[in-house]
Image: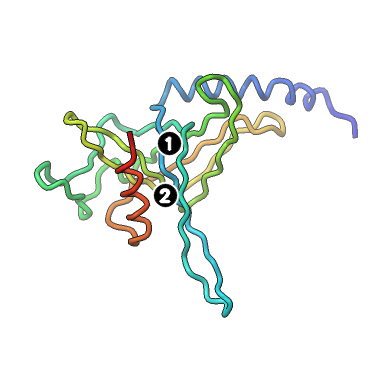
Amino acid sequence: MSKTPFSKLSEKLSPVIRKLSDINIELLGRDTQVLKITKGDTPDMYGVTSDVYSSEILNNVIIKYPLSEVEMFDSTHDNTADVDSISLMDILPIEVMVRYQDSGGVDTDVVGLEPADIIVDILRDEHDNKIPIRMEIKRIQGEFFGRDMVKRLYQATLTRGSYTSEVESLITDYINNFE
């Protein structure tokens, strides 16, 4: 099958557009390492499925929070999440982007996040205490030039409350080993 001039142009320009997208992402967000937790179903010999969680650490992620202020605690004294109130952080989407290249310019495999994946970002307070920000992937968007994807954007929302003991254990291990 012969290619149209636009298809040929798309093949040549898509890597350049991806590189420009990576630069744009780096200017807009905060480069971070996150924990990704994925839920899967495993059937037993009777066909009954049970939830199985897997985790991996992603290093080429940039997060753009909608506001410069992140509302995390109801009170600064007890460090408990306020699950009864709604703030703008609960409504406005958090943009999560995965670069096509690492900071050294080496191509990376773009990790596919899926809706309902949990990601955990860690912020630090003025005393260097680790503050986990738990998010859930809600939407996936892609930008294309011709038939080639040039940008992938995920929208996440904050999650509050607790998870299953297995997920909490994965999050706790990540927080304890985070440097």
Tell me which numbered mark, 2 or 1, is placed earlier along the sequence: 1
Q: Nearer the viewer, residue 108 or 62?
A: 108
Q: Amino acid at mark 2?
A: Ile
Residue 34 is left or right of residue 179, and the answer is: right
**Quarter in which the C terminus is drawn:** top left
Q: Which residue is mark 2?
A: 118
Residue 7: x, y in percent? 78, 27
Q: Are marks 2 and 1 in contact (CB under 8 Å)?
A: no
Residue drawn at (84%, 27%) of the image: 4
> For numbered disc 2, what is the local secondary structure?
strand
Residue drawn at (47%, 45%) of the image: 56
- Measure the alpha-carbon separation of dots 2 and 1: 14 Å
Q: Nearer the viewer, residue 119 or 46?
A: 46
Residue drawn at (37%, 46%) of the image: 135
Residue 49 is left or right of residue 92, and the answer is: right
**Numbered label tally:** 2
Residue drawn at (58%, 21%) of the image: 19
Residue 161: x, y in percent? 27, 56
Q: Amino acid at mark 1?
A: Glu
Residue 54 tag number = none
